[in-house]
Amino acid sequence: MTTAETTSTAIPERGFTDDEFEARTRRSQTMMADAGMAALLVCTEPEVRYFTGFHTPFWQSPTRPWFVVVPAAGKPIAVIPSIGAASMSATWIDDVRTWSSPQPHDDGVTLLLDCLREVAGSGRVGLPMGPETHVRMPLADVDRVRSERTDVVDATDIIRSLRMVKSEAEIAKHRHICGLVSNAFDELPSLLSTGMTERQAFAAFRGEILRQGADDVPYLVGATGPGGIDDIIRQPSDRPIADGDLLIFDTGSTFDGYFSDFDRNFAFTHAEQDAKDAYRAVWEATEAGLEACRPGATTTQVFGAMNEVLKANGSLGNDVGRMGHGLGMQVTEWPSHTDSDDTVIQENMVLTLEPGLLWAPGKAMVHEENLVVRADGPELLSRRATPELPII
Amino acid sequence: MTTAETTSTAIPERGFTDDEFEARTRRSQTMMADAGMAALLVCTEPEVRYFTGFHTPFWQSPTRPWFVVVPAAGKPIAVIPSIGAASMSATWIDDVRTWSSPQPHDDGVTLLLDCLREVAGSGRVGLPMGPETHVRMPLADVDRVRSERTDVVDATDIIRSLRMVKSEAEIAKHRHICGLVSNAFDELPSLLSTGMTERQAFAAFRGEILRQGADDVPYLVGATGPGGIDDIIRQPSDRPIADGDLLIFDTGSTFDGYFSDFDRNFAFTHAEQDAKDAYRAVWEATEAGLEACRPGATTTQVFGAMNEVLKANGSLGNDVGRMGHGLGMQVTEWPSHTDSDDTVIQENMVLTLEPGLLWAPGKAMVHEENLVVRADGPELLSRRATPELPII
């Protein structure tokens, strides 16, 4: 298997060259032409960032809508609140149209409609409306846009197929953050001990990831439990870690706006044989997933390969609903490894493998690794977990 | 003025008692009855957390929709992906309905429609559709819900009026995080120096906020600039801080899911008189805002009080679009201090005051403080900025 270990080296360049944004835009425009779309409208953080490079945590404020219109030819146009004018003008975008927001009676809708009319005439406008998307503007304003433009059609496939395959510049950012988080996981045995509370353990791990050089740790979940864990998306409690506990940490950390997303499991002082066996089962399932994960295979085949190992090891199923997913500017992206997803895996997709099982009622074990698909198989981005449950 | 300084004391309790969720639900049901709604549907993170206490960063994954239905009487009902079953069952909610997600052909829509039919019959269903809201599910699925239930109406006013006024338990969380961030700002002069890059300065400040005891620093923006700053929502660069630079840091940090949101400005080694004057002008504008901010006044009056001071000091306007806003589970919430918002200020609203001006072309100065409105005026939650521009 060609699963090369990756160690983090030089810090990748921040941002992207204009060439990268031009290529994204051109690919989009080719698909738009095929679908008969005169313009593409996007309004969520990753979509806007994908086409413009506009990168700010300001999106956490729900007050103001932000729009980018991709015309049939030429650069995207930003239609945004004036508070973003300086930042957006510093990107490769030339045409930045602003209004003073908040303005609840007309928060950019007229400006957006004017732009669409200018760019698309009465032509078809694409807007992502399908799985894993939402429209980040008030529904009343969506209704207003759709009452004036009757030919708004679903553009999920365009955005999905663009974003699923990463450039080498994007992959370098993923590789870097996965290396930093791997380093932080390696430090955990020296940072954690019984008697600490979950909350203290979380704080220590978050601090270590930042110390390694991550920009941020937007996603950190985990849990401890006596001999097992029942919930893998939990926030920490003041429960003290005790002898015989299992611990799972799962983090989505970022470098330059690109995520890692993998977990590690540990036991404190000792572990039951059942827990060790469950750990080994998900580790072996990951091996099977790595073997299956190559261009031309489907996500459903990857799911099947992992699921077979879990079933052979007595899995009672799991509540996660899939066994891994795409990774990018969001902690999870298309596609999903499920029994019916059937996405064809392509070179340069960045994916997670995340087999999980219930090894006893209320006792879950989930493993996760990050990889980029290469012509001859996966290149691991996370440093591979040990085959046996590590004991602290 | 009764702007008592607040120093952080004991760490508030995590979470809320069931009483708090019952009160929220009952208040909602009273307003629903007045509006003739048989059920209220919510689907964003803060709305779901408001009614249930369900608290996880898992919402960053865009893959799965989550729903809560508030019936005319009784507890809310959760209609959620099975991955959230364990966490949701640990809240005060009894009725947790799950499906295995992702399931793109029917990601919870049938289950949601069944629940609405059971709870609301053919009655009216409220859904937030207005300013500062969005519907966090694929638009194609929104269309499906609205094709089966024609009487879906806007419920923004209900959610808005509930969330704008905070309980003492919520206020205690705000006070705590504002105290921690105030402590971190007080440490900045000893953490920062010329020669550091912006990125190093950001990392030092983020680390200090976490060291003080914040759970997370989801929002951190800032900039440095020679004698002034042109963009207040920027991410850090590798620009080294130099003599004569101005620095602004603005952070939304969290404790138990509740935000602080205030900024501070500093100069390195020296500052121009114009910059000092601009600082003093926004400080004085904040004083005027504090004086105006009391129950019965409007957000427009508060805006006017601050704006008058800025105009008298030669403001060239600003790009922010408002001079402060509500604060809560999100870094910005309703209402906004603008020239037309006209929201009547009530006791126990948690608000920011955020006067800003351009004191020269491309040179912005913004101040921000956090407060809770009390019967006799504002109680400051952030430790008041110094009246003169601090020089490091």
Image (spheres, coloured by chain):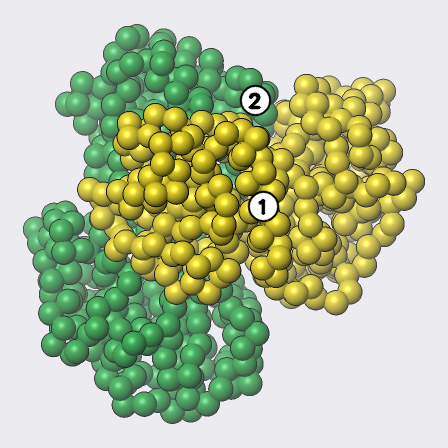
Chain colours: A green, B yellow
Labels 2 and 1 share a subunit: no
Q: Which element carries disc 1, helix, strand or loop? A: helix
Please state if B182 lies on the left or on the right of A205 as rendered.
right
Q: Quadrant of the N terminus of chain A?
A: bottom left
Q: Which element carries disc 2, helix, strand or loop? A: loop
Chain at numbered mark 2: A
- The residue indicated by pointer 2 is A104
Residue at x-position 29% and y-position 46%: B111
The answer to whether any part of residue B77 appears in the image is yes
- Residue B355 position, x and y percent, is 74, 31
- From mark 2 to mark 1, how far is it between C-alphas? 28 Å
Q: Is residue B76 above or below residue B93?
A: above
Q: Is residue B109 above or below residue A220?
A: above
Q: Residue furthest right?
A: B1
- Residue B299 position, x and y percent, is 73, 28
To which quarter of the image does residue B65 belong?
top left
Q: Quadrant of the C terminus of chain A?
A: bottom left
Chain at numbered mark 1: B
Please state if B194 lies on the left or on the right of B35 as rendered.
right
- Residue A51 position, x and y percent, is 35, 32
To which quarter of the image does residue B152 belong?
top left
Q: Is residue B272 above or below residue B46?
A: above
Residue at x-position 31% and y-position 58%: B82
Callout 2 touching callout 1 (CB < 8 Å): no
Q: Residue B26 bears which disc, if any?
A: 1
Please state if B101 lies on the left or on the right of A48 as rendered.
left
Residue at x-position 46% and y-position 17%: A109
